Amino acid sequence: MIDFFTSKKWLIISPHADDAELGCGGAMSRAVENDIEVHIAVATVKGEWHVRNGVYVSSETRKKELTNAMLEAGTTLHIINKINDNEIFDLCSSSKSKCVSEIDLLIENIKPDIIFIPVPSFHQEHKWVYECSIAATRTTKNVDSPKAVIAYEYPPAGWGDSGSWSQSSGSIYVDISKHIEKKIAILSKHESQMSTLENSLISLDAVRRLASFRGLESGVNYAELFYLLRSKIVY
């Protein structure tokens, strides 16, 4: 088993501006503390209507919040698709081959030891990014190919495709007990995305509660759950 925190470089592929932080915020904080170079690649940053409250959040607001979160985290940001508010863009209707090529290029330039990709949740754009990520992390004989490919969850991932993933198939719990407050601090920069409604799935409270539950499953105070998709030991 590869040790997360003895590697040199991580690449985390994130469908939207806050998904990497939701799924990996504690682990990435541990990584940065261990002098690991952490890169976050966000598939799309765009404006959006929040259906339940009818509020529009602009593309520039999302980018500003994301930039502030990355500064708080101490990570390097890459944006694959930055969409202006006057543009019409649907990620799932865009070119998969182009997205795969963009991720290929990031892998070639960064040469990460570990790549983290999102689980394919009920969200269609998460499924789309997962499929692009699987294509981009295909097995090659390149000596610089990653030593491990790992999938991360996020609070709403219990419903839909990822809800049926078997935790006996390579599940990894990472203790983030010393980094839960840092994870909360990073996510608090995404002010427009963190709901204040009771029992909301995307909220600082939900993040803490999910981490507590994963900690209960693994015998620590707070944890994040990952799935090992592929790992290799080389000569």
Image (cartoon, rainbow, N blue to C red):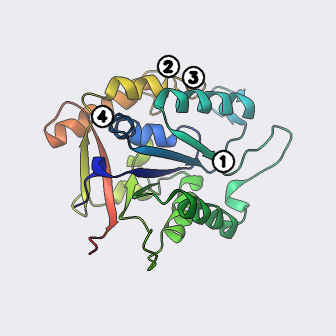
Q: Disc 2 to disc 4, how far (Cα)?
A: 18 Å
Q: Mark 4 sits on what residue?
A: 211
Camera-nearest residue between 74 and 132: 74
- Helix, strand or loop for disc 4: helix
Residue with the most extreme bottom position: 141
Between 205 and 222, the residue placed more toward the observer is 222
* Mark 4 / mark 1, whichever is N-terminal: 1
Residue that label 2 marks: 196
| Alpha carbons under labels 4 and 1: distance apart | 26 Å
Disc with the residue nearer the chain's start (3 vs 2): 3
Residue at 42% over, 73% down: 143
- Mark 3 Cα within 10 Å, few/some/many (few <14, many 20+)? some
| Amino acid, disc 1 | Thr
Question: Which is nearer the N-term, disc 3 or disc 4?
Answer: 3
Residue under label 1, please give it: 44
Left or right: residue 123 versus residue 148 is right
Q: Residue furthest right?
A: 86
Residue 208: x %, y % from top left: 34, 28
What residue would you read off at disc 3? 191
Q: Which element carries disc 2, helix, strand or loop?
A: loop
Instruction: Give whichever of discs 2 and 4 has the lower sequence position.
Output: 2
Q: CA distance from mark 1 to mark 3?
A: 18 Å
C-alpha span from label 1 to label 2: 24 Å
At label 2, the amino acid type is Thr
Give the image location of residue 3, x and y in percent. 25, 53
| x then y, percent, for residue 29 | 38, 34
In the rendered view, would you say 199 is above or below 93?
Answer: above
* Marks 3 and 2, how far apart at CA: 10 Å
Give the residue drawn at x 48%, y 74%.
138
